[in-house]
């Protein structure tokens, strides 16, 4: 893979991850009209790979578990694309931590931090606890206020600390839950473009009908 190929594939993969599949397909299709090389095939393969990955993530959730603590840590790279090439602008790290060990209280905290590139304005940082309704539509049962409170809008920063918040009486016994996170930002560079949204879902936690502690389904 040449030096110019990796950013291009990464940029298309990021667009797919943000839900901008139609725009990404248009970009790849337009490129394919003039180029039928190995890079083009790799770009087209990203769509089938993403579909398989999305199915697995939806079923199992993302992140790691240690005891009662779930940590979702990720780094998103964002790019400027022009014509048939893309260049890396920066990277932003996210970390969301959920502790179910003190049920009926559930706690959540974390941080957002620039790892490379210009300062940013976090235009959205949404954290929701959702009830897994199995074959019925899932529903939001708690909105975490500490996530949007982590950063003052319309200001540039390189770090936003999500202070610990507790969801009192968090969830009903015999049910499954998960957290959903959504983040967008704009940069202080150039024309101050917006990037995102990026979305993540944790693994499910189950609250037994007995008096025992909840546990993560891994």
Image (cartoon, rainbow, N blue to C red):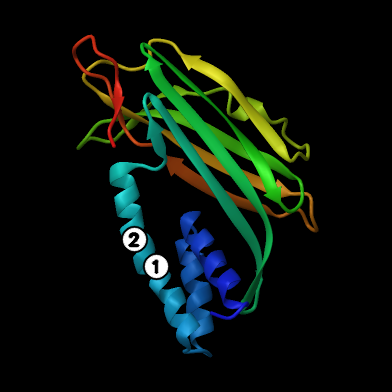
Q: Is residue 53 left or right of residue 33?
A: left
Quadrant of image for the C terminus: top left
- Residue at image point 67% right, 52% down: 194
Task: Judge from the rendering whether residue 133 lies leftward or rightward of residue 169; answer left or right.
Answer: left
Compared with 88, 19 (above or below) is above
Nearest the viewer among 13 and 4 is 4
What residue do we see at 35% from left, 36% from top? 203
Q: Quadrant of residue 156?
A: top right
Q: Residues within 10 Å of mark 1 (few under 14, many from 20)?
A: some
Q: Which residue is pictured at 68% across the width and 48% down the height?
A: 115
Position of residue 89 in the picture relative to residue 51 (left or right):
right
| Residue 197 image position (x, y, % from top left) | 55, 48
The residue identified by callout 2 is 51
The residue sitting at the front extreme is 66
Q: Secondary structure at mark 2?
A: helix
Task: State the SS at label 1.
Answer: helix
Q: Is residue 137 above or below residue 207?
A: below
Q: Which mark is residue 47?
A: 1
Rendering coords of residue 87 (x, y %): 67, 68
In terms of depth relative to the viewer, which is nearer, 6 or 178?
6
Image location (x, y in percent) of residue 106: 42, 17
Mark 1 and mark 2 in contact? Answer it, CB < 8 Å.
yes
């Amino acid at each position: 893979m040449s030096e110019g190929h990796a950013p291009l594939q990464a940029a298309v993969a990021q667009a797919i991850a943000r839900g901008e599949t139609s725009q990404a397909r248009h970009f790849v299709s337009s490129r394919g009209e003039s180029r039928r090389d190995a890079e083009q095939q790799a770009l087209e393969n990203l769509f089938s790979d993403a579909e398989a990955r999305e199915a697995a993530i939806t079923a199992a959730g993302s992140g790691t578990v240690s005891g009662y603590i779930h940590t979702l840590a990720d780094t998103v790279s964002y790019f400027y694309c022009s014509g048939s090439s893309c260049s890396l602008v920066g990277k932003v790290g996210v970390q969301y931590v959920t502790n179910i060990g003190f049920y009926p209280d559930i706690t959540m905290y974390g941080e957002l931090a620039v790892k490379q590139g210009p300062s940013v304005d976090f235009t959205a940082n949404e954290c929701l606890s959702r009830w897994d309704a199995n074959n019925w539509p899932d529903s939001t049962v708690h909105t975490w206020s500490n996530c949007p409170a982590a950063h003052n809008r319309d200001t540039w920063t390189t770090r936003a600390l999500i202070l610990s918040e507790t969801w009192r009486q968090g969830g009903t016994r015999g049910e499954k839950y998960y957290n959903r996170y959504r983040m967008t930002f704009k940069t202080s560079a150039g024309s101050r473009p917006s990037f995102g949204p990026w979305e993540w879902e944790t693994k499910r936690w189950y609250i037994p009908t007995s008096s025992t502690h909840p546990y993560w389904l891994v």
